[in-house]
Image (spheres, grey):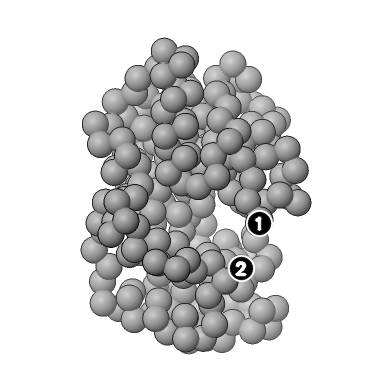
Amino acid sequence: MSNDQQGVIEDQWCQAKLIWEYHRMQHELRPVDVAIGLGSHDLGVAAHASELYRSGLFSTLVFTGGNSPTTAKVFPRGEAVHFREHAIELGVPAEAILLEPYAANTGQNITLSREVLATAGIHPKTVLLVAKPYMERRSFATASKLWPDVEILCASEPLEFDDYLKSIGDEKLVLDMLVGDLQRVIEYPKLGFAIEQEVPEDVHAAYESLIRDGYTSRLINP
């Protein structure tokens, strides 16, 4: 563990790892009708989606996402556009990729991707969401609410927490994101945005502790 770059101490690291493990759904992957790569600051999503395509799990891949404050500088043409380009570089045929370049949040990722698929004449019964590791649970809860007649599976890069921190290079950003995503898992069902997910007591305690320690930049006002 690196604890000097952003001042993440041992106790905070342990709490963050607990939340990290909670966010991951641990779904057993199998062939699905389509996959949707959810746009973000993490190009590893596109790389993992490409790997899963090459493994034969699906024949159609949607990349979805416009821009957000954390991605505008990194992906100036939009998350989905850059993800698509990276996937093509990694060997995914252009004709296998559908583009949804406007979504500004996870709910729009799902609803707009569904519209893109319908326009292409595709009405899937099984959908694989490929996301950042700590976004699996929130994307699952959101898609299950907005697309209830479809079976949802989730996948992300099979990285350990330490390795993910190193790959992103910004420990505080990752911890802020872990906390922010967990807040949305807790609060969004009350707003009708997602299905409810049980949060174990130790995970909730870790969440509250990291908020007290200042990992709050990704929190919303519920």
Name the residue at 54% across, 82% down.
214
**Residue 70 circle label:** 1
Q: CA distance from mark 1 to mark 2?
A: 10 Å
SS class, disc 2: helix
> How many C-alpha atoms fall within 10 Å of the one at disc 1: few (<14), some, or many (≥20)?
few
Q: Are marks 1 and 2 in contact (CB under 8 Å)?
A: yes
> Horizontal and vertical percent for residue 85?
69, 31
Q: Residue farthest to the top? A: 121
Q: Is residue 209 above or below residue 186?
A: below
**Residue 132 circle label:** none
> Horizontal and vertical percent for residue 46?
59, 40
> Horizontal and vertical percent for residue 210?
47, 81
Quadrant housing residue 4: bottom right
- Amino acid under disc 1: Thr
The residue to which callout 2 is attached is 173
Name the residue at 46% across, 74% down.
16
Q: As drawn, is 94 to the left or to the right of 205?
A: right
